[in-house]
Amino acid sequence: MANLKEIRTRISSVNSTMQITSAMKMVSASKLKRAQDAITDMRPYAEKLQEILGNLSESLDTSDGVYSVQREANTVLLVAITSNRGLCGGFNSNIVKECQRLIKEEYASSKVHVLTIGKKAKDLLKSKGIPTNEGELPSDLEKVWDSVNFETVAPVAQMIMDEFVAKNYDKVIVVYNKFKNAAVQEVVPEQMLPVLPPDEVESSSAANDYIFEPNKEEIVEDLIPKSLKIQLYKSVLDSHASEHGARMTAMHKATDNAGELKRELTLHYNKARQAAITNEILEIVGGAEALKS
């Protein structure tokens, strides 16, 4: 049985850990509200933009567009979106697992490059022997999380679009955590490029009668690049909210576990102290009896 000093030290250590995890939970909860509001406000705009683009594309042949060219997927780019920090449960590892699955199963016959947005994806994939951000791909995209806004994400989307147009990649898949609620995040592999034909994406069932100015072709040509940038920005916002939700949930569970462990150690300490006091009493009584005899 551990002595009383060791048990007191463990109780103190667990108590300190519980205070840290509780503070991290509260910080994540406050950040989650802002991140959740951001993605909630963004989704209707992104969905409406996609709906308008779908309605326009239905009456046009956009297959000749530079972002719509369907090529054999010889070279695939996976954009893995994770956080720069850990302590958020399976948030980061789930993205890495999905990337591994895509590499081994769906694109086993293709050459796959991985572009990481977030330090954890780069570290985890490197530890598994999967190189990231090779060649002309930038290596400092974790800076995106220093200031999550459209101006920060748009250049990354433009760089990916330029790489696709230059035929360095035949397909681009974004792998991210879609925010459901604080406790649930869904890993989603979403095709960014080439742009899917209108019959393969969800569109409004009701046809809308619009007046187009200057004309449909020019509007579509302008909307597609903007839509692609919005698509990546929405994925980053989803991941941002999911990260704080996952961390809040993980820290809540860690705090509960630390509290339970503290209760068990306190009970163990009280039993050990009671046993020590009983032994001391027995020794005193035994000594008194020895003196009497």
Image (tube, helix red, strand yellow):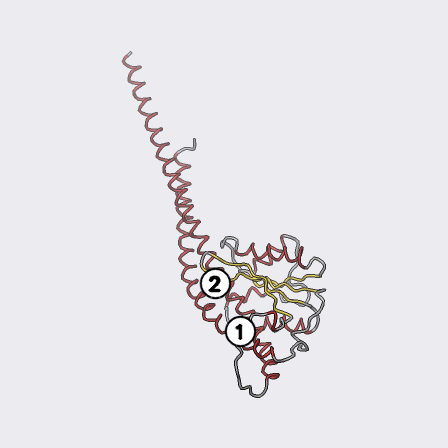
- What is the x, y in percent for residue 185? 50, 58
Task: Report the front residue among 104 and 205.
Answer: 205
Sequence order check, earlier mark of 1 and 2: 1
Residue under circle 2? 241
4 w.r.t. 81: above or below: above
In the image shown, does 62 or 234 lie closer to the viewer?
A: 62
The crowding category of the residue bearing disc 1, from other C-alpha atoms within 10 Å (few below 14, some 14 to 19, many at least 20), is: few
Residue 103 position within the rendered picture, expressed as x and y whole percent measured from the top left = 66, 57
Determine which of the numbered discs, if any, sits on residue 1 in the image: none
- What amino acid does circle 2 point to? Ala
Gap between marks 1 and 2 measured at Cα = 30 Å
Which of the numbered marks, if any, corresponds to residue 205?
1
For the N terminus, give its image quadrant.
top left
Residue found 62% across the figure and 52% down from its top: 127
Quarter residue 264 falls in: top left
- Residue lying furthest left in this view? 292
Amino acid beneath label 1: Ser
